[in-house]
Image (cartoon, rainbow, N blue to C red):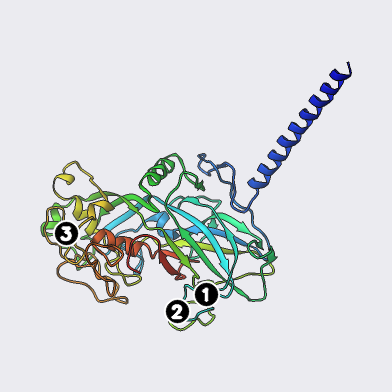
């Protein structure tokens, strides 16, 4: 009889122990759901759902809310002709619209002393805070719950994480006396474990393909030729161009993991920048409210005609790769892989014919003069590959476009960062 009582007591003890374990596990899960990066399912404004993520709350005074934006152009695309003089435009007459613009962001970092080495933006003081994802984000997706973007009216920024303390420096509070912290982030290959921030079903399908293909950034959309409508350029679709398809779908997978370090920050203006830089580096925290650190992905970089920042954008080089049989079925589709092996210094179409530069609107000339004659993309001092080794230089147009694309990460709209490429590429 005594033996049975002891067994009953033991059973009751084990039951209560199991209950306690389950209770603690559920509590830890709830705590994780309220963490800075978000861990639960969320409902999108259009009724769709995304799993693995809940939007972060404002951390309050002395904290930082991290967000990501493709600026207005990721949402609205590039109109042709442009609505106003000076608006971003594809100078060869294509209207470019994005169906999806997917990116995987990771390792949001804050470090001491952004001015540690005035002549070397890549070097900072010690790491004081870090939030890890990775986060899978569709920058082309509008949502009324997004934050206002840093670049101007109509822009949106997707909140992805928040932080109130220096979690890599003893959880000290951030200084709010004007001290600036160096800001950095990574763009990484897509992984199945990424937190799907705002992906609908179609975007999730594309993201799964990104995982398989190891894309870091994926452009999906449509280019529609609308050139020949501007006085002085009505003949820009004459000759060989007249037979080109008027609509081209694109799916551009870039495999370019990159760290963007110690970014300059337009929010610091009119503070004086270091010599050779446009804005003062880093983020200063505020005593009365949180600040927003906006990862910004510029959409035009892969389409530039040179490696000079803010060069004019063109789409002809992609449309040219679907001429011939590929164009017979109506609206053809072009991929970045279709530019593999194409000489960026003497560009040809899919039939091997040389191309000339085409302009359906006068290009801006503040970066470089208008180009003319045979289409040759300008690498400036970036070397051509020797012996086919991509680490020594650019081998073809795919390398050229990827090199430009890898510079597209910024802080708070236009803040340039030190770029560290983690794929075989010249520096």
Helix, strand or loop at label 2? It is: loop
Give the quadrant of the N terminus: top right
Q: CA distance from mark 1 to mark 2?
A: 9 Å
| Residue 93 appears in the picture as rendered | no
Picture layout, residue 324 above or below residue 291? above
Q: CA distance from mark 3 to mark 1?
A: 45 Å
- Whole-percent x and y of residue 289? 66, 65
| Label 2 vs label 3, nearer the camera | 2
| Residue 189 appears in the picture as rendered | yes
Mark before the other along the chain sequence, 3 or 1: 3
Mark seen at residue 192: none
Residue 407 found in image quarter: bottom left
- Whole-percent x and y of residue 406? 37, 62
Using a 10 Å C-alpha cutoff, classify the residue at mark 3 as few (fewer than 14 neighbours), some (14 to 19) or many (20 or more).
many
Using a 10 Å C-alpha cutoff, classify the residue at mark 1 as few (fewer than 14 neighbours), some (14 to 19) or many (20 or more).
many
CB atoms of marks 1 and 2 within 8 Å: yes
Residue 299 found in image quarter: bottom left
Q: CA distance from mark 2 to mark 3?
A: 40 Å
Q: Is residue 140 left or right of residue 222?
A: right
Count of numbered marks:
3
- Whole-percent x and y of residue 148? 53, 59
Residue 347 found in image quarter: bottom left
Q: Is residue 378 left or right of residue 40?
A: left
Q: Which residue is mark 1?
A: 281
Q: Which residue is mark 3?
A: 237
Foreground residue, 215 or 352? Answer: 215
Helix, strand or loop at label 3? It is: loop
Q: Which residue is mark 2?
A: 277
């Amino acid at each position: 009889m005594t033996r049975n009582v002891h067994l009953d007591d033991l059973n009751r003890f084990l039951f209560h122990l199991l209950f306690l374990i389950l209770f603690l596990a559920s509590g830890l899960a709830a705590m994780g759901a309220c963490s800075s990066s978000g861990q639960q399912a969320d409902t999108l404004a259009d009724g769709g759902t995304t799993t693995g993520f809940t939007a972060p709350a404002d951390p309050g005074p002395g904290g930082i809310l991290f967000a990501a934006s493709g600026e207005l152009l990721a949402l609205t695309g590039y109109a042709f002709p442009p609505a106003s003089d000076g608006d971003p435009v594809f100078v060869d007459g294509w209207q470019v619209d994005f169906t999806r613009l997917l990116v995987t962001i990771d390792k949001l970092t804050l470090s001491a002393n952004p001015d540690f080495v005035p002549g070397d933006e890549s070097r900072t003081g010690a790491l004081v805070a870090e939030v890890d994802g990775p986060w899978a984000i569709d920058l082309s997706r509008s949502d009324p719950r997004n934050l206002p973007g840093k670049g101007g009216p109509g822009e949106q920024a997707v909140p992805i994480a928040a932080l109130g303390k220096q979690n890599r420096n003893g959880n000290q509070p951030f200084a709010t006396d004007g001290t600036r912290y160096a800001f950095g982030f990574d763009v990484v290959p897509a992984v199945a474990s990424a937190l799907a921030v705002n992906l609908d079903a179609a975007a999730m399908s594309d993201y799964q393909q990104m995982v398989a293909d190891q894309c870091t950034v994926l452009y999906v959309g449509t280019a529609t030729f609308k050139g020949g409508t501007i006085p002085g350029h009505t003949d820009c679709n004459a000759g060989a161009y007249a037979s080109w398809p008027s609509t081209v779908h694109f799916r551009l997978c870039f495999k370019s993991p990159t760290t963007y370090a110690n970014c300059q920050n337009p929010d610091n203006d009119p503070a004086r920048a270091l010599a050779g830089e446009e804005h003062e580096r880093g983020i200063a925290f505020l005593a009365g409210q949180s600040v927003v650190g906006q990862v910004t992905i510029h959409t035009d970089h892969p389409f530039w005609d040179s490696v000079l920042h803010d060069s004019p954008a063109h789409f002809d080089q992609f449309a040219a790769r679907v001429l011939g049989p590929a164009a017979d079925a109506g609206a053809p589709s072009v991929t970045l892989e279709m530019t593999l092996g194409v000489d960026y210094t003497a560009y040809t179409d899919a039939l091997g014919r040389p191309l000339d530069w085409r302009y359906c609107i006068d290009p801006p000339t503040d970066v470089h003069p208008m180009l003319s004659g045979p289409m040759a993309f300008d690498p400036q001092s970036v070397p051509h590959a020797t012996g086919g080794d991509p680490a020594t230089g650019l081998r073809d147009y795919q390398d050229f476009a990827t090199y430009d694309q890898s510079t597209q990460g910024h802080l708070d709209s236009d803040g340039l960062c030190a770029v560290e490429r983690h794929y075989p590429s010249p520096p």
